[in-house]
């Protein structure tokens, strides 16, 4: 399967991996900043999201990531991942440590994490059962991007975070066959690259818990919480996030 990949600039390669409810555009504000700092920036759309074709069968997010590195001719890269993209970076670092130079985990997920029941589950199930893709996307946005809604409870028309989630509505109704990766937490002590963990003060508690576990399990990891920010930090607090990323990359380099 050929994924949509964007490869810009020269210098040390940085991969930007998006969340499972967005596409590569969640990094729109970060790309020019990284390019201006002299990095080569690679970002891609996961199968079925953005401009990437739908998967035709089971697929591994780690294999997808390795395929992106192979397609761009990159032996190793700095990895910046949001949510599921963060979990994938950790999984690659554990399975193929020579491929990852550093990790920046933004509101990260974690393979093998026993997630509690998240708010709004009944509403998401109801939207799925009535095959309402837009309604399901709205419920995902309500969970992960509550800052996208106005006082009347409607998504803001000019909000880029809302657009990048709602544009995935058609895909949310598909049955994705994603290959489960081994649990990451028992092996976090094996990660030997610089790691930055960034959380939003308005994110769900399970993500904060995952962030703390990464910070405790990865030697030397730095944990930072930014405000005001929900799960979609790259589009909420870019003016705070970008300096953190640049300092982290400079130190790792």
Image (cartoon, rainbow, N blue to C red):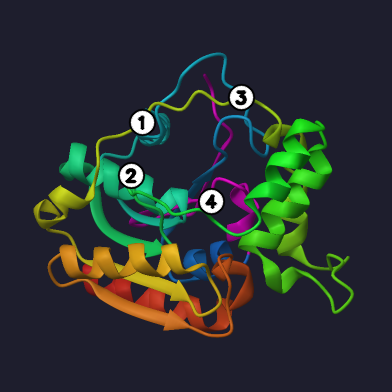
Q: Earlier in the sequence, mark 3 or mark 4?
A: 4
Callout 1 environment at 10 Å: few (<14), some (14 to 19), or many (20+)? Answer: few
Q: Which residue is mark 1?
A: 180
Could you say which is closer to the camera, residue 225 or residue 32? 225
Could you say which is closer to the camera, residue 45 or residue 211? 211
Q: Which residue is mark 4?
A: 19
Q: Earlier in the sequence, mark 2 or mark 3?
A: 2
Q: Which residues are magenta?
A: 1-28
Could you say which is closer to the camera, residue 161 or residue 242? 161
Q: Earlier in the sequence, mark 4 or mark 1?
A: 4
Instruction: Check whether the beta carbons of the residues at disc 3 and disc 4 lie within 8 A of each other.
Output: no
Per the image, label 3 sits on a secondary structure element best described as loop
Q: Give the label on residue 111, or none.
A: 2
Q: Is residue 79 above or below residue 33?
A: above
Callout 2 environment at 10 Å: few (<14), some (14 to 19), or many (20+)? Answer: some
Per the image, label 4 sits on a secondary structure element best described as loop
For the C terminus, the image quarter is bottom left
């Amino acid at each position: 399967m050929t994924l949509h990949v964007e490869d810009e600039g020269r210098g040390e390669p940085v991969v930007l991996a998006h969340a499972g409810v967005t596409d590569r555009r969640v990094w729109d504000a970060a790309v020019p900043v990284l390019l201006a700092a002299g990095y080569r920036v690679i970002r891609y759309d996961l199968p079925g999201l953005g401009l990437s074709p739908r998967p035709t069968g089971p697929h591994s997010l780690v294999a997808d990531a390795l395929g992106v590195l192979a397609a761009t001719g990159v032996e190793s890269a700095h990895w910046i991942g949001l949510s599921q993209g963060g979990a994938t970076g950790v999984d690659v670092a554990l399975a193929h440590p020579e491929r990852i130079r550093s990790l920046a985990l933004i509101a990260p997920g974690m393979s093998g994490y026993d997630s509690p029941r998240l708010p709004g589950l009944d509403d998401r199930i109801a939207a799925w059962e009535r095959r309402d893709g837009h309604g399901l996307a709205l419920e995902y946005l309500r969970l992960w991007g509550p800052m996208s809604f106005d006082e009347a409870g409607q998504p803001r028309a000019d909000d880029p975070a809302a657009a990048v989630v709602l544009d995935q509505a058609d895909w949310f109704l598909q049955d994705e066959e994603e290959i489960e990766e081994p649990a990451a937490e028992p092996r976090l002590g094996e990660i030997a690259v610089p790691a930055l963990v960034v959380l939003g003060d308005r994110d769900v508690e399970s993500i904060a818990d995952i962030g703390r576990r990464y910070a405790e399990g990865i030697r030397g990891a730095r944990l930072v919480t930014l405000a005001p920010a929900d799960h979609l930090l790259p589009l909420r607090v870019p003016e705070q996030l970008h300096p953190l990323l640049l300092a982290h990359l400079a130190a790792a380099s």
